[in-house]
Amino acid sequence: MGARKRVKAEKIKEEKKSKAYAILRNCPTSPRKMRLVVDLVRGKQVNTALDILKYTPNDGAIRVHKLLLSALSNWQAKNEGVRIEDANLFVKEIFVDEGRMLKRIRTAPQGRAHRIRKRSNHVTVVLDSAVINETQNTQN
């Protein structure tokens, strides 16, 4: 590994230490359906987002709710001594990427076969504190 690559890798590693995030991999829902759920909570306060997901009837909402709770506990682990209520947490980033696709074959008329693509996705949630951002903006 070259020097520039190593420096860049260390920089990315340091940024990840301060970020509170959670990733759900290979969720057996199509990315298109999951994006509908994810769009509901993007940019919202964490408590509001949890309430929205709790009462959303989609199957993906249950998984995203659990993922958001995981990101919240990751934030708590990285920020010991800070109360969640005082931190004013919000969903900074949340996005869905396509996961692996299982390819199956269904029989069709006249000796043909149709492909069935069973899609999956990866969901990533990044939380941020509005209190920290306000103090950084006043310093700059």
Image (cartoon, helix red, strand yellow):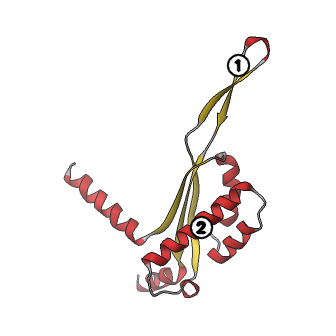
Q: Which residue does the numbered mark 1 point to in the structure image?
A: 113
Residue extending farthest to the top is: 110
x, y percent for residue 81 = 45, 87
x, y percent for residue 17 = 38, 69
Residue extending farthest to the left is: 3
Q: Which residue does the numbered mark 2 point to in the structure image?
A: 68
Q: Residue at x 49, y 74 (%)?
A: 75
Give, as a three-letter code, the residue at label 2: Leu
Image height of 17 relative to 96, above or below? below
> Dividing the picture into quarters, in which one does residue 6 lie?
bottom left
- From the viewer's side, name the closer residue of 38 and 134: 38
Looking at the image, do the residues carrying marks 2 and 1 touch, with CB atoms under 8 Å apart? Answer: no
N-terminal of the pair, mark 2 or mark 1, is: 2
Image height of 20 relative to 139, above or below? above
Q: Residue at x 48, y 71 (%)?
A: 74
Q: Residue at x 54, y 80 (%)?
A: 130
Q: Residue at x 34, y 63 (%)?
A: 13
Q: CA distance from mark 2 to mark 1?
A: 41 Å
